[in-house]
Image: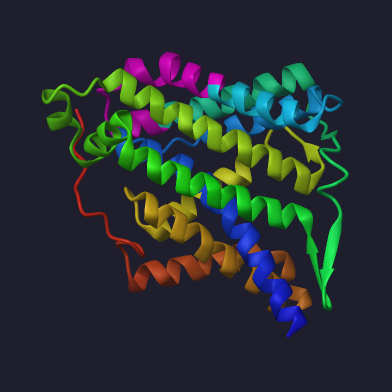
Amino acid sequence: MALFVQHVIDATTYGSLFALYALGIALIFGIMGLINFAHGELIMVGGYTIVLLAHPPWPVVILATIAVAIVFALAMERVAFRPLRGASPPTLLIASFAVSYGLQNLAILIEGSAAKGVSVSTWLSESFQIGSVSIPKLDVVTVAVTAVLLVSLGLFLQRTRIGVQMRAAAEDFRIARVLGVKANTVIATAFAISGLLAGVGAYFLTAQTGEVTPDFGSNPVLYAFVATVLGGMGTLRGAVLGGYVFGAIFVALQAYLPIELAPYRDAFAYGAVIVMLLVRPQGLVVSRSVVTRI
């Protein structure tokens, strides 16, 4: 029972991280129809910010990480994606890959290709015991912060003027613009929120791994894409649900695969997702709207 509880805690922690990553992908896709694979580089930029600011107090490091990720997200939207706003989805997808590889190579030129070790917080590396179950403090903080962010984002989209405009743009971008929604403001806000989520995700991922590399965000963005597809493209609730379901699959395979098959955990995880999509190709949560773009 203690081992099962430990696996549930791990699944919830991984699911929270995957949900954070997936929300950044789903938010931009919902408004622009863009699958932004360069979102991983926002996580990478956040990781290198932590490396450069390893000694100040942790609140300063967190705020700086989030701020830098938001600035890069806004610059990405303004420089790379705004000029291509009327382009076809394949063109936008190729542009996102170009931005991703460009930032990765820029990181290699500046920081080198070797991993940079960093210690985020000694407090987060500690654990506490509840009976025979050891719970890392990092896991508790990850789940708690993710829950706060999910609730805050939901309230933002429901209660604020710009949030309502973002929801309207996700329903039908063309009609929303006709009704007076400013496309630049809505899209820039969506990128800023994705940068915030990437910055928070970067902090937790750095605390978990203890190192940063130029391809630091590659696996997270792949997990985010899989979680988004699993949950249902175009719906934020689906992205969150997909993140937690994928986290459960991830941990279950990690815990119960035979030792000789353990190196192929990711392949089995993606295979399980494919089987689920064959059964329910629209995803776990069906979007109530068909997003129209111009």
Q: Is residue 33 visible?
A: no
Would you identify the image quadrant in which residue 108 lies?
top right
Q: Nearer the viewer, residue 98 or 206?
A: 206
Residue 276 place in picture, x, y as percent = 41, 71
Q: Is residue 206 left or right of residue 56?
A: left
Q: For the magenta stretch, what is the residue range?
A: 71-93
Would you identify the image quadrant in which residue 167 lies?
top left
Q: Taking 151 as reference, is 248 above or below it?
A: below
Image quadrant where one finds the N terminus: bottom right
Task: Determine the residue positioned at 55% across, 21% down.
Answer: 72
Q: Taking 31 as reference, is 129 above or below it?
A: below
Residue extending furthest toward the front: 159
Q: Nearer the viewer, residue 184 or 41?
A: 184
Q: Is 166 a magenta residue?
A: no
Residue extending furthest toward the bottom: 1
Q: Is 85 a magenta residue?
A: yes
Task: Determine the residue positioned at 58% across, 63% down.
Answer: 247
Task: Determine the residue positioned at 54% across, 38% down.
Answer: 197
Provide the major secondary structure of the magenta segment.
Answer: helix
